[in-house]
Image (spheres, helix red, strand yellow):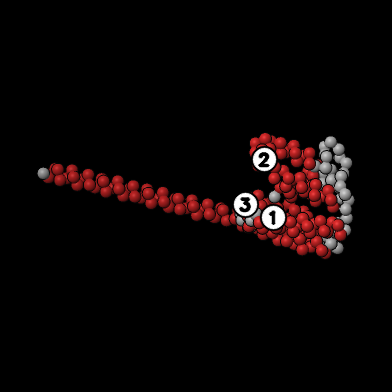
Amino acid sequence: MLSVVPDIDLLIPFIEHRGPTHSIITSLIIFVPILAVYHKKATPYLIALIQHSLIGDYVAGGGIQLLWPITTQHFGTSLNIKSQTNITIEWVIFLTSMIIMLKTNDTAKLLQPHNSNLILSIPTFTVLLPTFLSFPLDVPASLIPPHLVYMAIFVASITIDLHKNLKRPKEKNKTSKCKEACVARMDNGRTSLKNAYKQMTELTVVKQCRS
């Protein structure tokens, strides 16, 4: 999830794309308190965050502000997205990520409702969907299959989470109604017990008076 966070700059008008949010210095500063609390456990999440800049945009992104705020200079290989080298790299990364996701069962986790799934709307609506809506396509035909797979997984994950969130109010209403019904039954039971006790007391008093 964290690997897509740097592209949030596409949703913020006054921040340059592949600027401050793609800086590894920014990532390290953000993770200082997290590393202080969780230590080594937080390391994989830090790697997931910075790999977006170091592997993805550095190689074929046309340059990023890797060391912002120290410098606003753009770093990168300026490798053309349509070059055979970039296509090979992207396919290797795609196949590797798919194998890892299947082995770690992360694909199944993405298809389960969780609020963090909504983070996937960042790459879905800022990168993947615009890619296919543009004409002519900016992406080489050989890279369309990986894009389609990612988009299918992301859209499914977002849809499942939204569906779950929409169902929660109904479930809460059902739960509250059940609680109200239970409380009402308990109150009725208490009233019945009180009435029965009162009647028994009255009968006892009458018997005593007759005797």
Where disc 2 sits, the SS reads helix
Residue at 53 percent of width and 52 percent of height: 172
The residue that label 2 is drawn on is 40
The residue that label 3 is drawn on is 114
Q: Quadrant of residue 160?
A: bottom right
What's the CA distance linking mark 3 and mark 2?
24 Å
Point out the image quarter for the C terminus.
top left
Query: Disc 3 vs disc 2: which is toward the camera?
Result: 2
Residue 93: percent from the left, percent from the top? 77, 55
Q: Nearer the viewer, residue 135 or 184?
A: 135
Q: Quadrant of residue 156?
A: bottom right
Residue 62: percent from the left, percent from the top? 87, 50
Closer to the chain start, of discs 3 and 2, is: 2
Q: Is residue 41 above or below residue 171?
A: above
Residue at 65 percent of width and 42 percent of height: 41
Residue 131: percent from the left, percent from the top? 80, 59
Left or right of 178 on screen, residue 66: right
Q: Nearer the viewer, residue 122 or 107?
A: 107
Badge 1: few (under 14), some or many (20 or more) residues near its Cα, within 10 Å? Answer: few
From this viewpoint, is residue 166 visible?
no
Which of the numbered marks, if any, corresponds to residue 100?
1
